[in-house]
Image (cartoon, helix red, strand yellow):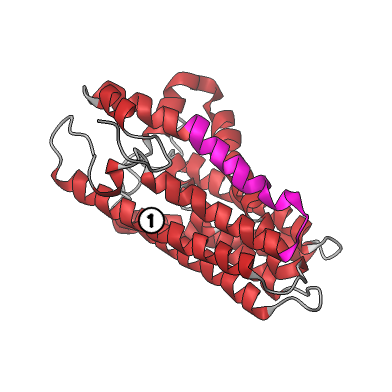
Amino acid sequence: MRYPALVSDVNPSRARAFALCTLAYVVALAVGALVVAMLPELSPLAAVAVADVAATVVVFVFSTVFRNSSFYDPYWSVAPIPIAAYWAFSPVEDGIPPLRVAMVLAAVLLWGVRLTYNWASHWGGLHHEDWRYTDFRRKTGAFYPLVDLFGIHLFPTVQVFLGLLPVYAAVSLGQAPLSVLDYVGFAVALAATVIEAVADAQLHAFAATKKPGEIMDRGLWAYSRHPNYFGEIAFWWGLAILGAAALPGAPWVFAGAIAITVMFVFVSVPMLDARSKERRPGYEAHMKRVPAIFPWFPKR
């Protein structure tokens, strides 16, 4: 199914595509900020939740108008930066260690900038759409707009918001003194960002020279079929540890890390593996040798 012709079918240049995507996120940020300003009676947590949904709907409108759901792709890494900053600079409880706030903000900023840069460096423009979205559109037909809104846009937004709950705990609520757990969480988040960056760089280098049907099994990819996903999962667990350090005994800080882990293990990885099995004859044997996400020595 194709959407009605709301815009020209001529593929815009990559520069114009980035300009349109940037416009989408500027408008989304402005709408989110306006929503927060209109809800002064809500806590910063609740206000951001409403604003997050409103900003997502703005991006969804752009995705619909330009018939490309990949408008949403950078939301995962872009939205956490202003959200974390807003919480950190809103009125907070007294006694929150400034170093903890600085560590949390630094972790989110480094991860977000790195992941967004990775997306921007390899996005082909509006003529390119993630194959999963194309597949959903083909399979769901007339119901795709609902799948697009709730499955491709709002579902990840909810996942990321849950993942940011420990950030709120750490920068707005947690009065516990700094402990070893803070440094462990920060180290995990930084190490995860590095692992993900290395895995992505190795994958892009491989993609530039690979032969048809060739399987990526070198570098970090020799120990995990999806080491970039391992890095992503580990990042959210790093934030969860920081949240637990700030609010000991608050299990809800782990909700996001658990939800994101479940999504990658039971949705993202099976989809990618199934596609690779169709496209690469030796991939099924590769699956038997190399762990899916969590790195370990391959079987001989």
Query: Would you say 110 lies left or right of 242 here?
Result: left
Decide which of 286, 56 is in the foreground and name it: 286
Amino acid type, residue under disc 1 in the picture: Ile
Decide which of 277, 227 is in the foreground and name it: 227
Q: Residue 111 appears at what percent x and percent y?
A: 47, 62
Queried whether the magenta region covers residue 251, the answer comes back as: yes
Query: Would you say 298 lies left or right of 134 here?
Result: left
Q: Residue furthest right?
A: 41
Queried whether the magenta region covers residue 215, the answer comes back as: no
Is any part of residue 266 visible from this angle? Answer: yes
Dominant secondary structure (helix, strand or loop) of the stretch shown in magenta = helix
Give the image quarter of residue 284. Answer: top left
Decide which of 160, 287 is in the foreground and name it: 287
Decide which of 6, 246 is in the foreground and name it: 246
Is any part of residue 18 visible from this angle? Answer: no
Element type where label 1 sits in the image: helix
All told, the count of numbered labels is 1
Where is the N terminus found, in terms of image quarters? top left
Which residue lies at the image location 46% right of the left edge and 67% below the top edge?
A: 110
Residue at image mark 1: 195
Query: Would you say 290 lies left or right of 136 here?
Result: left
* Region of the chain picked out in magenta, as a range: 246-267
Q: Residue 267 appears at what percent x and percent y?
A: 50, 31
**Looking at the image, residue 192 lies above or below residue 7:** below
Where is the C terminus found, in terms of image quarters? top left
Give the image quarter of residue 128. Answer: top left
Which residue lies at the image location 72% right of the left edge and 62% below the top edge?
A: 169
Q: Residue 263 appears at what percent x and percent y?
A: 54, 36
**Looking at the image, residue 84 lies above or below residue 268:** below
Binning the other alpha carbons within 10 Å of mark 1 as few (below 14), some (14 to 19) or many (20 upward) gives many
Which residue lies at the image location 28% right of the left edge and 21% below the top edge?
A: 278
Q: Residue 122 appears at what percent x and percent y?
A: 30, 52
